[in-house]
Amino acid sequence: QVQLVESGGGLVQPGGSLRLSCATSGFTGDHYVIGWFRQAPGKEREGVSCISTRDDSIRYADSVKGRFTISRDKAKNTVYLQMGSLKPEDTAVYYCAISPTPLGKLLRSNFYNNWGQGTQVTVSS
């Protein structure tokens, strides 16, 4: 059974930083893409970043380039999202998800079939 568990969300002031973690287990595929998505109230789910286990290629949404960094610890089966220079518009529930195909690099949620429960990130003074 595939499981993804996010942690690290919370309340932070504008300009601050947070690091989200996504612990994965139970996935038996050789190569896959792990993505971070977010959804703010009243808005559609948005792809934030992803990393491929095949070649460690990375993609970021334009809205977070230069501020967020995705990385993974192979030994711990954990993917991290380091978020910096946070803005109020980054406020959302953040989800990690697994795509079993390279199409996950497109950062579209329909290519991902296993999702975590989400963690709330609130950026406010």
Image (cartoon, helix red, strand yellow):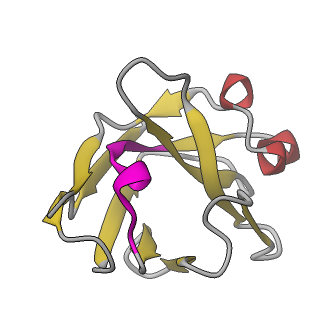
The residue depicted at 42 percent of the width and 79 percent of the height is 85
Q: Quadrant of residue 100?
A: top right
Q: In the rendering, at what x and y percent does residue 124 appear? A: 19, 58
Q: Quadrant of residue 42?
A: top left
Closer to us: 75 or 55: 55
Q: Which residue sits at x=68%, y=72%?
A: 65
Q: Quadrant of the C terminus?
A: bottom left
Asked whether, in this view, residue 1 is left or right of residue 35, the answer is left
Q: Report x, y in % for residue 107.
A: 74, 44
- What residue range appears in magenta? 86-96
- Is 114 on the left or on the right of 10, as rendered? right
The residue closer to the viewer here, 70 or 2, is 70
Whether residue 80 is situated above or below residue 30 in the rendered picture = below
**88 in magenta:** yes
Q: Residue at x 74, y 57 (%)?
A: 31
Residue drawn where x is 29% and y is 52% of the image = 6
- In the figure, 27 relative to 54: above or below? above
